[in-house]
Amino acid sequence: MTTLNLGNLATFRLVVQRGSFSAAANVLGLSQPAVSLQIRQLEQFLQARLIERTGRGVKATAAGVALLAHGERIGQAVDEAIRSVSAFSHEVSGTIRLGTGATACIHLLPPLLQRLRLDYPLLQVGVTTGNTPGIVQAVEENRLDLGLVTLPASGRTLDITPFLNEEFVFIEALAHSHPAASLTPEALHALPLIAFEDGSSTRTLIDGWFAAAGLPTISVMQLGSIEAIKRMVSAGLGYSIVPQMSVAHPNDRKGLNVRSLDPLLQRQLAIVIRQDKILSRGIGAIIQLLQKKSELI
């Protein structure tokens, strides 16, 4: 090998970020021996030991720390080079890696991605679903180009831009309409709640709504899928509190009665991107469409 292998360099950075060869292998979809081979090839090329094992995993040696600092700049230079070359093409092309929650993936992204396909047929968009902490980490590690997450979210290397406020609503089966004039935490506390699973941003917001009234969240079911929750509710097994976008379309609220909560419960969605990310024309097009979408909701 007579030149620095950028793929091996990226693997080295990921191993250090994740703290182990196996964790990096899981992210890359490779075997652990394949990741180890890439690190050995990089060390052989540079004639220096870059990683050492510790009781808690692995860490960069002094030489590795020096390489990490250059690795950031090398990645930025490569991105700038690609952007400069792309500027000579009138077509928006390339691949964008986008991460978001399951609800936004189902109810927010499809028309947006359809618009992108019509406007920019050469642009490919890959979508990954997950929770806010996982998406934020993937953006920080440059495994995703941008993320759509529920606030709060934080990261020292990130730009986080709110773009949409969304109401959470009460849903119940049409055949089991709740008589209460006002859907307060006190009015709902004794009823069977079909809730999102613990650890999700959505569940944290709902827990906070009850906690503000001095009440714990008590559920009869905990599910990770908004569509599964709606099916259980429409079957009359309980009520739920869900993002409004999940029941905005008539087909999405069949068999359901939808009402506002008292007090109102809202979440804020934000666009998350690395501060040093080169904004390609494709990324710019996605951000622009998201901002336009928020104006229409």
Image (cartoon, rainbow, N blue to C red):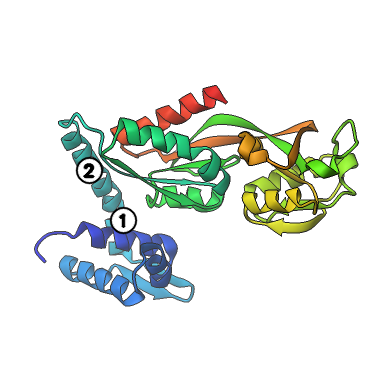
Q: Earlier in the sequence, mark 2 or mark 1?
A: 1
Q: Mark 1 points at which residue?
A: 68
Judge left or right: residue 261 versus residue 83.
right
- What secondary structure is marked by label 1? helix
- In front: mark 2 or mark 1? 2
In the displayed structure, would residue 66 be above or below residue 1?
above
How many numbered marks have been drawn onto this rendered protein structure?
A: 2
Q: Is mark 2 on a helix, strand or loop?
A: helix
Which numbered disc covers residue 77? 2
Residue type for callout 2 = Ala
Q: Is residue 213 above or below residue 263?
A: below
Spatial CA span between label 2 and label 1: 14 Å
Image coords of residue 243 (percent x, y): 65, 39
Residue drawn at point x = 19 percent, y = 29 percent:
90
Q: Quadrant of the C terminus?
A: top right
Query: Residue furthest toward the top?
Result: 295
Residue in view at x 75 percent, y 43 percent: 208
User: Badge 2 local density, few (<14 within 10 Å), some, or many (20+)?
Assistant: few
- The N terminus: image quadrant: bottom left
Amino acid type at mark 1? Leu
10 Å neighbourhood of mark 1: few (<14), some, or many (≥20)?
A: some
Look at the image and tell me whether residue 263 can be seen: yes
**Residue 181, x across and y down, in percent:** 89, 31
Left or right: 286 as drawn, with respect to 71: right
Residue 195 is situated, as x and y percent measured from the top left of the image, at 73, 52
Nearer to the camera, 114 or 199: 114
Label 1 near label 2: C-beta < 8 Å?
no
In the picture, measured across the screen, residue 269 lies left or right of residue 14, that is right
Residue nearer the viewer, 30 or 152? 30
Residue 89 pos. (x, y %):
17, 32
